[in-house]
Image (cartoon, helix red, strand yellow):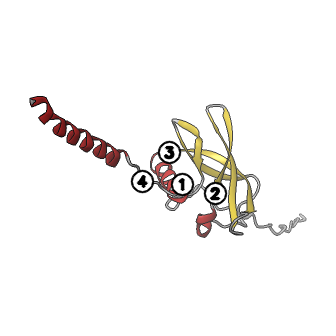
Amino acid sequence: MNSFRLYPILAFGATAAIIGYALLSRKNKKSAKQLEWERRTDLTRGGRIIDGNVIDVLELEEDTSGQQMLLLIYTYDVAGVTYEASQDVTHLRQFIDLYSCRLGLPASVKYDPHNPGDSIVISETWSGLRKPTIVMPQRPVAKFSTFV
């Protein structure tokens, strides 16, 4: 008869263990924007910097919302491997001069040393986009000859 007294205690313990496991293992679902922000922040803090080139800037229309999506396409080399990547910079438009981003523009790229395919060119606190140097045409220099 003593064994029947243990059943409620075991049932209570098992129920508490199941509820505790369910509460502790429950993860907060993060939005895609929040996950991308965390990725950019991690790369900004701990990424390695390497030289790259901007290939193009594409404006794509999203089907559902009608809002335009802005992609920055770039290349970079890590340990002899050439990577071509794109970064969604739709929410970073205030940090980018779209008219200065053109084919072959040199840029600094931050990449994850453990996963070189994971990279960024711009974030909220760091920019690898270099300002293009504007070459002003020079006026021809008048050559004077002296007669002796």
Q: Which of 60/95 is in front?
A: 60
> In the shown orientation, is residue 49 left or right of residue 133?
left
The residue tagged with tag 3: helix, strand or loop? loop
Residue drawn where x is 70% and y is 65% of the image? 64
Callout 2 touching callout 1 (CB < 8 Å): yes
Distance from Cα at disc 1 to Cα at disc 3? 15 Å
C-beta proximity under 8 Å, tags 4 and 1: no
Residue at 62% over, 45% down = 51
Which residue is denoted by mark 3 in the rendering?
47
Rounded to the nearest whole Å, what is the CA distance between mark 3 and mark 4?
A: 26 Å
Q: Residue at x 68, y 56 (%)?
A: 72
Amino acid type at image mark 3: Gly
The residue pinned by badge 4 equals 28
- x, y percentage for residue 15? 26, 43
Amino acid type at image mark 4:
Asn
Residue at 65% in and 46% down: 52
Q: Position of residue 96 (x, y in %)?
A: 63, 65
Which amino acid type is marked by label 2? Answer: Asp
Q: Is residue 133 visible?
A: no
Observer-nearest of 38 and 93 = 38
The residue that mark 1 highlights is 36
- Sequence-wise first label, 2 or 4: 4
Quadrant in the picture for the C terminus: bottom right
- Which of the two marks, 1 or 3, is nearer to us in this view? 1
- Nearest the viewer among 55 and 1 is 1
